[in-house]
Image (tube, grey):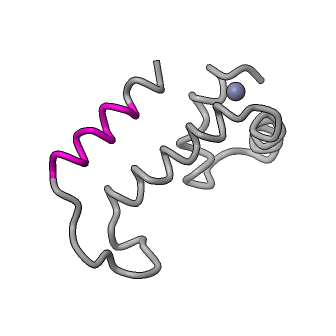
Amino acid sequence: MTCSELVELVTGYLDGALDERSETLLVVHLDGCPSCRALLEQHRQIIRLLEPTALPTPLPTALPPARRTILLAAFRDSSR
Ligand SMILES: [Zn+2]
């Protein structure tokens, strides 16, 4: 799997929507690719921001909108 293939699948991976083969390939790639691990972590953080109810504990304070914009911009940059 290449990095760009991983980018295509990362959302499905976080949703648990990948088939077993794709998920295995993705995990193997992540194991050897620090930049894709960072990308995955970014996606996780964005999902947390967009779905605050999915948090195990509530955020003490909401993130200011400007910070969310910065994170979303970082996400768009990394997915190119
Ligand atoms: Zn990679």
| Residue at 37% across, 28% down | 76
> Residue 8 location in percent, x, y?
57, 28
> Residue 73 location in percent, x, y?
30, 31
Q: Is residue 9 left or right of residue 61?
A: right
| Residue at 47% across, 26% down | 78
Q: Is 74 in the magenta?
A: yes
Q: Is 20 in the magenta?
A: no
Q: Which residues, given as a range, are shown in magenta? A: 65-75
> Looking at this view, is 15 or 62 the one in front?
62
> Residue 58 location in percent, x, y?
34, 80
Q: Is residue 56 above or below residue 16?
A: below
Q: Is residue 35 above or below residue 10?
A: above
Q: Is residue 6 above or below residue 48?
A: above
Q: Residue furthest bottom?
A: 57
Rendered image quadrant of residue 23: top right
Quadrant containing ligand 1 reads: top right
Q: Is residue 46 left or right of residue 3?
A: left
Q: Is residue 11 left or right of residue 34?
A: left
| Residue at 61% across, 35% down | 9
Rendered image quadrant of residue 2: top right
> Looking at this view, is 19 or 78 the one in front?
78
| Residue at 55% across, 48% down | 41
Q: Is residue 79 left or right of residue 72?
A: right
Q: Which quarter of the image is occupied by the N terminus?
A: top right
Q: Is residue 4 above or below residue 68?
A: above
